[in-house]
Image (spheres, helix red, strand yellow):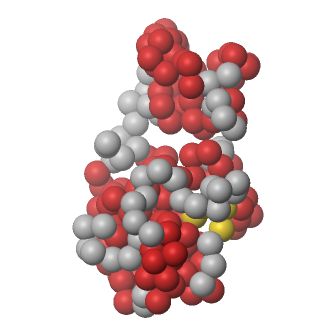
């Protein structure tokens, strides 16, 4: 799955929060992680639009793109679902073992490596392509045809926001998540 600007911006902001959780030997739920990020970065547009349902996806970027290739503990497992107190379905292995490994690891030893990775991510992201309103509307409808059943009907209330985000260069999946993630079924 290609990285989006939203993936990168949020993964970079969430990483130090996960390191702090590891240092304290605790987990935290996606909602608290999103709320903490908003409190720490009140002027960041990506954080202000971040819905807790999308936090797991951004933590998975840290797992897939940083810790897993380096054979590091699964730091992203410390972000959990509020109800189940477990990470999302992308995580395999014994949860308690994953946490113990993340808690025991000296994350300061890879701080420079993470900063280098963050710079690589930023360079990988293509500049945003501005779109016309007509193009944005078509992209919104194309996305809705394939993924519309994942959202409650109230998603239509976010139509203008979704179109605006697509016009600004967001991909439809990110635009829907940013503007209407709270209408995702099962929320």
**Left or right of residue 184: residue 148:** left
Above/below status of 146 relative to 183: above
On screen, residue 129 above or below 58: above
Is residue 94 shown above or below 182? below
Q: Is residue 33 above or below residue 50?
A: below
At x 52%, y 75%, the residue is 96
Q: Is residue 74 visible?
A: yes
Residue 164 in view here: no
Direction from residue 74 to residue 161 in the image, left or right = right
- How many marks can you see? 0
- In the figure, residue 142 lies in which quadrant? top left
| In-front residue for pair 92/78 | 92
Identity of the residue drawn at 48% across and 31% down: 173
Q: Quadrant of the C terminus?
A: top right
Residue 166 image point, x, y percent? 50, 26
Residue 30 at x, y = what percent? Answer: 64, 57
The extreme front residue here reads 94
What is the quadrant of residue 4 in the picture?
Answer: top left
Q: Which of the pair 46/87 is nearer the observer?
A: 87
Name the spot of residue 62 as percent of width and height, x first: 41, 63
Q: Residue at x 36, y 41 (%)?
A: 127
Left or right, residue 109 beside residue 33:
left
Q: Nearer the viewer, residue 161 or 95?
A: 95
Point out the image quarter for the N terminus. top left
Residue 152 percent across, percent down from the top left:
68, 22
């Amino acid at each position: 799955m290609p990285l989006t600007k939203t993936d990168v911006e949020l993964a970079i902001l969430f990483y130090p929060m996960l390191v702090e959780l590891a240092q304290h030997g605790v987990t935290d739920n996606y909602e608290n992680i999103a709320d903490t990020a908003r409190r720490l970065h009140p002027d960041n547009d990506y954080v202000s639009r971040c819905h807790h349902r999308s936090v797991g996806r951004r933590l998975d970027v840290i797992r897939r793109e940083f810790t897993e290739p380096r054979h590091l503990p699964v730091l992203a497992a410390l972000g959990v679902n509020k109800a189940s107190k477990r990470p999302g379905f992308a995580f395999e292995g014994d949860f308690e073992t994953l946490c113990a490994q993340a808690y025991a690891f000296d994350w300061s030893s890879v701080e420079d490596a993470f900063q280098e990775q963050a710079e690589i991510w930023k360079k990988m992201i293509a500049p945003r392509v501005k779109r016309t309103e007509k193009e944005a509307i078509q992209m919104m409808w194309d996305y809705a045809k394939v993924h519309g059943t994942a959202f409650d009907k109230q998603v239509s209330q976010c139509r203008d926001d979704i179109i605006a985000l697509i016009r600004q260069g967001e991909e439809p999946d990110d635009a829907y998540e940013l503007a209407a993630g709270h209408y995702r079924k099962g929320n």
